[in-house]
Image (cartoon, rainbow, N blue to C red):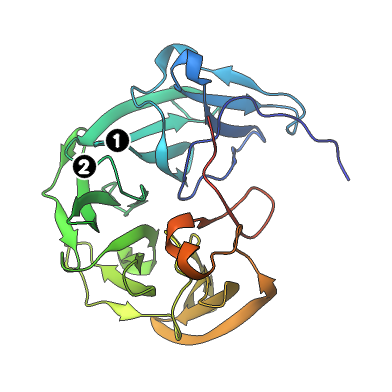
Amino acid sequence: MGKSSRVSGVEPESHSHHPPTVDGNGNLYRMTETPADDGNNPQMLESSDGGASWSEVDSGNRPDARDLEGTYQLQVGTTAFFSVTRGPQAWWFGFNTSDAAEGPDTWIATEMFDDDLTNSGVDQASSLAQISDGQFWLAYSDIVIDGRQQIALRRRTGPGTYGSKVTIDTTSDSWTGPRLVLGRDDITHLFYNDAQDDRLYWRTIAPDGTVSDRTRIDADNTAGVAIPHAHTIIYQRDDAEVMVTGFAASDDRLKVVTIVNETVGPEETVSAHPVLHPPPRGPQRRRSRPSLAARDHRPCRVGRRSQR
């Protein structure tokens, strides 16, 4: 086993998908926050020795977002893009890695694209996908209506320019954990949780913004937690497009569903033991609300929110 090293800073809370990044020069990157006494500012840490040591780069241009929640990261070529929710605000920003042709190892534009979110009683989450013309789709936790959480969808059409906000699904139910992945032909796939009835749904978003009807992909309910599903993996296998979604099922065990060419397959049980920590039981089931999150070197694990 190799040696371990410490990546300084505070992990963003309740992050949606936030893996380490590697660039074409072999450098590793990890965005964390500075400690609370330094404002919980975003900081980009870089390692040029395989993770043995880390140091901050471009500290003078840290994004304006603070105390990051619901962080989602998307690496496209030489840039890592981020979506973040923070209290009533939602943010988009990016970072160029060392192999970028222009502005290497620098933060790029920081944009707040929504400032009217509910900032209490909400399971904060966000996600983003970039289509071939450079535009972005952003899905994120929005307002809460009489205790029912809502998900918003918005298109970034250019620098500082965003389309109208669209509410995903009915406002009579509660929805959490939006996850976006880009498929072939610029079709974006949205996965999200029915937090009222413990079901997992999937929709497609066409390049022109047309949102498909929802399709339920679990067979017998998800676990009664805030966000039971992990980031969806998508890949091409011969002529087939394959998506794999893992989630904590109603028995607290990890299951996966594979979707091939937009045809949903059966559930498959992956773990023999519960994957929730702590396992929700009885009247405490809804109150503990852990979330399924991808960790650095483990396929999935459920953990509580970090404490500052």
- Secondary structure state at the residue bearing disc 1: loop
Q: Residue at x 51, y 55 (%)?
A: 290
Q: Quadrant of residue 45?
A: top right
Whether residue 253 is visible, yes or no, is yes
Location of residue 42 with respect to 237 vertically, above or below: above
Q: Amino acid at mark 2?
A: Leu
Q: Amino acid at mark 1?
A: Gly
Disc 2: which residue = 117
Whether residue 289 is visible, yes or no, is no
Give the percent coordinates (x, y) of residue 10. Answer: 56, 29
Disc 1 from disc 2: Cα separation: 7 Å
The outermost residue toward the top is 60
Among the two numbered marks 1 and 2 on one chain, the one whose residue lies closer to the N terminus: 1
Q: Quadrant of residue 177?
A: bottom left
Disc 1: which residue = 87
The outermost residue toward the right is 1
Q: Residue at x 50, y 70 (%)?
A: 282
- Secondary structure state at the residue bearing disc 2: loop
Q: Residue at x 53, y 20 (%)?
A: 35
Q: Is residue 260 left or right of residue 25?
A: left
| The one of 85 and 25 positioned closer to us in this rendering | 85
Location of residue 113 with respect to 129 vertically, above or below: above
- Circle 2 residues within 10 Å: few <14, some 14–19, many ≥20: many
Location of residue 174 with respect to 59 vertically, above or below: below
| The one of 99 and 253 positioned closer to us in this rendering | 253
Q: Residue at x 41, y 16 (%)?
A: 61
Q: Quadrant of residue 293?
A: bottom right
Q: Is residue 92 left or right of residue 307?
A: left
The outermost residue toward the left is 164
Give the percent coordinates (x, y) of residue 123. Answer: 36, 50
Instruction: Tell me, yes or no, whether the two marked residues, 1 and 2, touch with CB atoms within 8 Å.
Output: yes
Q: Is residue 26 left or right of residue 183?
A: right
